[in-house]
Amino acid sequence: MNRCNLRNLGMNMNHAGVYLHIPFCRSRCSYCDFATGMYESGLAERYVNSLIEEIKDWGEVDNPAVVNTIYFGGGTPSLLTPAQIERILNAVRDRFQVLAGAEVTIELNPGDGGTSAVAKLETIRDFQQLGINRASFGAQTFDDRELKQLGRTHSSDDITSTFYQLREAGFENINFDLIAGLPGQTLQGWQRNLTAALELRPEHLSLYLLDVHEGTPLADQIKRGLRPKPDDDLAAEMYLMLIDELSTAGYEHYEISNFCLPGFESGHNTKYWTGAPYYGFGCSAHSYDGLSRRWQNEREVVRYVETIEADCSPIVNETRLTKADREAEAVFLGLRLMQGFSFTEYSRTFGADLREKHEDDLARFREAGLIECSGDLLKLTRAGALLSNEVFAAFV
């Protein structure tokens, strides 16, 4: 079984990850604020060519990074053909030192309205045969009415059928995304979602509390009174219910919003929380060198393609982190992992004592029941996970 276990030697978090942004969708969800656009075959081919050129031009030619995770995100990467995915993977393997057994994830949309090749078993098998060994898809909810309100093109039946197609194709590492706090969603409805998800028993589950972004159709619907405002207190109840249900079912709560069966943590996403390097390619992709440099690509699809075709760099923003920036990030990103954050590691890295530096904040959060100190580890409590932004703000 090809388990992607962070505790296995192959998941050394000092190794780099590669993120590949594929911005195309069949339709746009009402809540979406990502860099996505409608799928057009001609633009998709130009985009793939540009993405490959960006990978080929990546800077560290003489000293290629060792990579153990590759992540196709979007958008709906599975709208690309297996041949296009293969060309992109070949470019990554040519430019980077990709370890055998690397975790390779592709995001897909369940069924994609029944019109995409992704719904066909042979296409899923093609992806698996290319070395893709992890699948992630936005189930979001098993309630067809809620799916329709969100502008999703799939049904609850599509979730189930796509899951079993992935299993039949040989996928042994599957993630579901679920959204809590949808307008009009009830606690009973959320319970039905959890029951449906646990009946399928994916290896990984990610939770998103609905965040209403200005400029999205959902924000406009709420502003016009066509949808009720999300209930933050109810969403909090849903989150705590999720923790209880998944814990009882044998899942580990390893990160604030992520749960897995033992050994199935997301190796790629964990890089974001542990300060490991990751290199993003494609429009809106972000990168971090693992030391002090972050950079971001052009967000708009056509401008990205035209920039690459003009033989120019797609990078539009670059930040050099100060020592204070890196100290703050190490704490508030590290605390996202429920295993805790090491005081000793902080001291070794930054030459400072976190207990002394934030003595008042730590005392205040401990008294409020939001954190706990267990030996060398600083951890969020169950209540702290729910109110994590309040804790993180003290370290920024």
Image: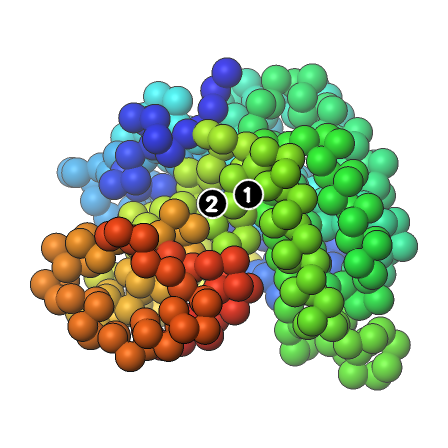
SS at circle 1 = strand
Q: x%, y% of residue 49?
A: 48, 42
Q: In the rendered image of this protein, does residue 235 appear above or below residue 67?
A: below
Q: Quadrant of the C terminus?
A: bottom left
Q: Amino acid at mark 1?
A: Phe
Q: Nearer the viewer, residue 248 or 176?
A: 248
Distance between the alpha carbons at the discs numbered 2 and 1: 6 Å
Q: Which residue is mark 1?
A: 259
Q: x%, y% of residue 23?
A: 59, 52
Q: Amino acid at mark 2?
A: Tyr
> Is 242 situated left or right of 350 in this image?
right
Could one spot residue 131 in this view of the protein? Answer: yes
Q: Residues within 10 Å of mark 1 (few under 14, many from 20)?
A: many
**Residue lying at 74% horizontally and 59% vertically, measured from the top left:** 29
Residue located farthest toward the left when viewing the structure as drawn? 351
Q: x%, y% of residue 137?
A: 65, 41
> Is 256 situated left or right of 36 in this image?
left
Q: Do the residues under discs 2 and 1 have CB atoms within 8 angstroms?
A: yes
